[in-house]
Image: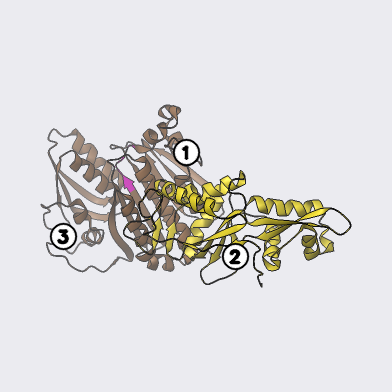
Amino acid sequence: MNIQVNGHLDIQAVDNIIQTFNKSSSKSKLTLDLRFVTGISIECISWLVIVLLSLKKEKVKISIIAPSDDNAVLYKLKMWRFFDVLKEEDIYNSIKKQIYVHPFVNKHWIISLKLLKSNKDVRSIINGVLDDLDFCFKNLNYTKNDIGHLSTVVSEACMNVLDHAGDDAIGVFAAELIRMEPKRLVISLADDGCGLRTSLSRSNANATDWDDETVIRQALTKGVSGVVDGDRGLGLPAVVTKLSQYRGALYIRSGQGSMRHRMTHEGTLEEVFSSEEVPVPGTLISVSLPPATN
Amino acid sequence: MLKKTSLLQRRSSLLLHGELILADGQPLQEGATTRLILIGRPEGKRFLPYLEHRLEELPRRSVMPIDCQHVRVMDISFGDESLGRIARRRTAKEYPERYLVLENVGEELEANLQSLCEQREIVLVVTRTGEDLPTLLGELSTELSDTYNIAVREGRLTARELIEQIGGESKLTIAASSNRLTRLEALGVVAQVDAETIEGGGRQKVFTPVY
């Protein structure tokens, strides 16, 4: 099955890839042609890797036709170490030898994708956030104290994947400083786990009857958890609390829907739920942090 | 602000480092000696019995500083399962007259601990890296915070002394003054060390800051 992607590769485009593939009669191989991709977002890259890794788990052979050498998308993919993460051998058009690519790409600062399978990976990600992203935080006028608070956001989001997604789940962490206006740091975390509903149903029998919006709202509520233990349920709610303090935004997608959660400059909380046809289980969380206000 | 010594007995510090062997025979964080990243509930649960044991071993009226110079990050989940549980049990009057403070807390770690205190509505006593004066983390009213600072400055404090320190204009009654000190004691940030006779009859409790 050969799927060509044209234009901007976003989350819906990734969903379309998997939906098209699922409808095809041949499910042993997927060739993804990225030569005509003109742009790719950070939320999308972590979701794309998760989707491709889930296919690999199902023994689907994946080939990527990479964009040409002069294409900015290829530089971004290389900065993310996209090809290394997928560990594919038969990547057409990709440059075999490692070349140095400056982390600035079109005014963006990108760090490589990181797979998340264990506590060790979370430590590596947090160290990366504190070291590799130090430049990004300073660029957004965050103090060390702010960075400490935001490392909590990253840690809780990552541990949430390990705690709730299931034993065989894989997470993908991505981060990027967008230096064009509106300037912001975007962190994205996707996993191929069981999703929020299944996780919450471990300790809430009613969760199986909740609609997708309620599932996401409950997952963001303090004290509601997927683990049977009275003192749980701080992870994602703590993320929301911290993001609200920094006027950040949260996008969370699980089940057949997504929620955009944002604190406005006027201090009002905006929550918008959208129903979406999501072809694979798992969860995608994206955090966007604006420059410090003081 | 100058600080007078606490009347509690200060025990030797517990230095957190990766090779610290916990109650389960495993190190606190394998492969790390410094820049510890303490994360997740399972790891916090592993640390709790060790911390409890050290706390139970303390003689009464003593404080054990936990030296955090090597801790880079402690997330809310880890802190909740260890320090958070101890703080909540203290409210239930466990570990009487035995106290913990966190020393050499870096800016990033302080932010982590502040998040824990906000989420769990607890209060922790910490000293920042390179500082001697203690700081209270957590949400505390100005009155309680001021009372603690007076206790730190004086080294000891009774309800009457608190009224004198604040000044007569505050119209703080003995009952309200005692109440402030009792609330700080319940939070584990001051300790009652004595009860002394008052001139003219009666007795009053003497409190000291835990650090």
The residue to which callout 2 is attached is: B134
The residue at 76%/53% (across/down) is B178
Foreground mark, 2 or 1?
2
> Which colour style is shown?
by chain
* Cβ atoms under marks 3 and 2 closer than 8 Å: no
* Residue A146 visible from this viewpoint: no
Drawing shade for chain B: yellow
- Above/below status of A257 relative to B38: above
Q: Chain of mark 3?
A: A
* Residue B203 visible from this viewpoint: yes
Q: Is residue A252 magenta?
A: no
Which chain is drawn using brown?
Answer: A
Q: Disc 2 on helix, strand or loop?
A: strand
- Above/below status of B35 relative to A89: below
The quadrant of the rendering that contains the N terminus of chain A is top left
Please report the bounds of the magenta region as a residue range: A190-194
Along the viewing direction, whichever of A187 and B5 lies nearer the viewer: B5
Q: Amino acid at mark 2?
A: Pro
Q: Amino acid at mark 1?
A: Arg
Q: Label 2: few (<14), some or many (≥20) within 10 Å?
A: many
Q: Disc 3 on helix, strand or loop?
A: loop
